[in-house]
Image (tube, helix red, strand yellow):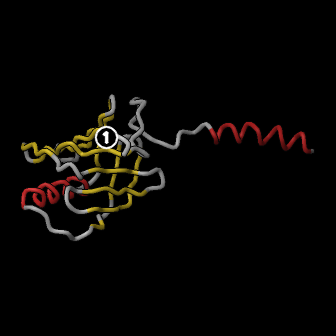
Amino acid sequence: MILTAVALLVPLTLACGSARPDSGPPGSGQPVTGVDWRIDSLTADGTTRHAPATAHLRIDTDGKAAGNLGCNSFSSRATVHGDRITLGDLRTTRMACAPDRMDFERALARTLTTGTLTARADDGKLTLTDGDGDRIHLSRRAPE
């Protein structure tokens, strides 16, 4: 009986252990979740704005997202299905920064939460595109 149990559990354990905890767009070979991303720029309404150095994003495999919008930190629920990412309402701190940083932050928050984003990851870079064609350009953050 023990031999039968071992024969059944070993393949199951190996199958469960081989699943990748990080997910990425199909065919990209690069994870999107579990990665610290630096937000480089945002292209919204045809205008590209460079992100403040503090802007970053991380989406974890447990459905949590967090980061910094350029001035304020945020957290949110995240749903990832293949190359589709949806963030829920953002919970943010309420600090005030220079007007240009606050403008960037509002535009970024709007792009992150207007609906489902399509992810495209390639060579340490990630692009998130919303339904209006606005794009968030990210790259892997260097370890601190």
**Marker count (numbered):** 1
Identify the residue at image location x=13%, y=54%.
104
Report x, y in % for residue 120. Answer: 31, 36
Which of these two is toward me, 45 or 123?
123
Q: Is residue 131 above or below residue 99?
A: above
Based on the displayed image, in which of its 4 quarters is residue 137 positioned?
Answer: top left
Based on the displayed image, in which of its 4 quarters is residue 72 positioned?
Answer: bottom left
Answer with left or right where residue 115 lies relative to residue 64. Answer: left
Q: Mark 1 falls on what kind of element? A: strand
Answer with left or right where residue 119 lies relative to residue 132. Answer: right
Inspect the image, locate mark 1, and give the three-letter code of the amino acid beneath it: Ala
Report x, y in % for residue 31. Answer: 42, 38
State the residue position of label 1. Answer: 119
Q: Is residue 33 above or below residue 29?
A: below
Within 10 Å of the Cα at label 1, are there few (<14), some (14-19), or many (20+) other Cα atoms? many
Which of these two is toward me, 116 or 112?
112
Identify the residue at image location x=21%, y=47%.
131
Identify the residue at image location x=12%, y=61%.
102
Report x, y in % for residue 58. Answer: 36, 50
Q: Split into 4 quadrants, where in the image is the N terminus?
A: top right
Residue at far right of view: 1
Report x, y in % for residue 68. Answer: 27, 57
Identify the residue at image location x=44%, y=56%.
63
Q: Is residue 69 above or below residue 1?
A: below
